[in-house]
Image (tube, helix red, strand yellow):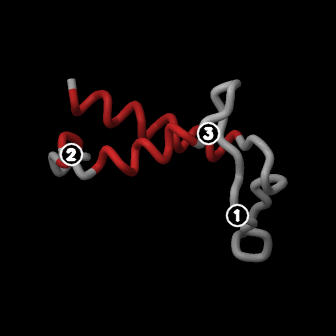
Amino acid sequence: MQAGLGRDARLNQALDVIRKKQDAQGRWQLEYSYTGRTWVDFGPQKEPNKWVTLRALRVLKQVRHFRN
């Protein structure tokens, strides 16, 4: 985004994928298990996850900022 790519139309498809994965409460689920691959446990797979939600919201916020 900082490189000026926030306005690139090719980004729209990826953003649509992110938006479609949001649940009715505005959260995103942990889709993949990272158990044994990281130092921390990110929570149960296929459940709403605060870290995935935080990351998705940050991406969407950045895109809105650069497109305005």
In this view, the mark in front (2 or 1):
2
Give the image location of residue 63, x and y in percent. Answer: 32, 36
Callout 3 amino acid = Thr
Q: Is residue 44 left or right of residue 17?
A: right
Label whose residue precedes the other's in the sequence (2 or 1): 2
Q: Is residue 40 left or right of residue 8?
A: right
Q: Tell me the residue that label 3 is attached to.
A: 53
Q: Which mark is residue 9?
A: 2
Q: Which mark is residue 32?
A: 1
Q: Residues within 10 Å of mark 3 (few under 14, many from 20)?
A: some
Quadrant, the C terminus: top left
Label whose residue precedes the other's in the sequence (1 or 3): 1
Give the image location of residue 3, x and y in percent. Answer: 17, 51
> Which residue shows up at 50% across the image and 44% down it?
18
Q: Is residue 24 left or right of residue 68?
A: right
Do tag 1 and tag 3 residues touch (Cβ < 8 Å)? Answer: no
Q: Is residue 25 left or right of residue 67?
A: right
| Above or below 5: residue 33 | below
Label whose residue precedes the other's in the sequence (3 or 2): 2
* Residue 21, picture quadrant: top right
> In terms of secondary structure, where does tag 3 sit?
helix
> Which residue shows up at 34% across the image and 35% down it?
62
> Which residue shows up at 54% across the image and 40% down it?
20
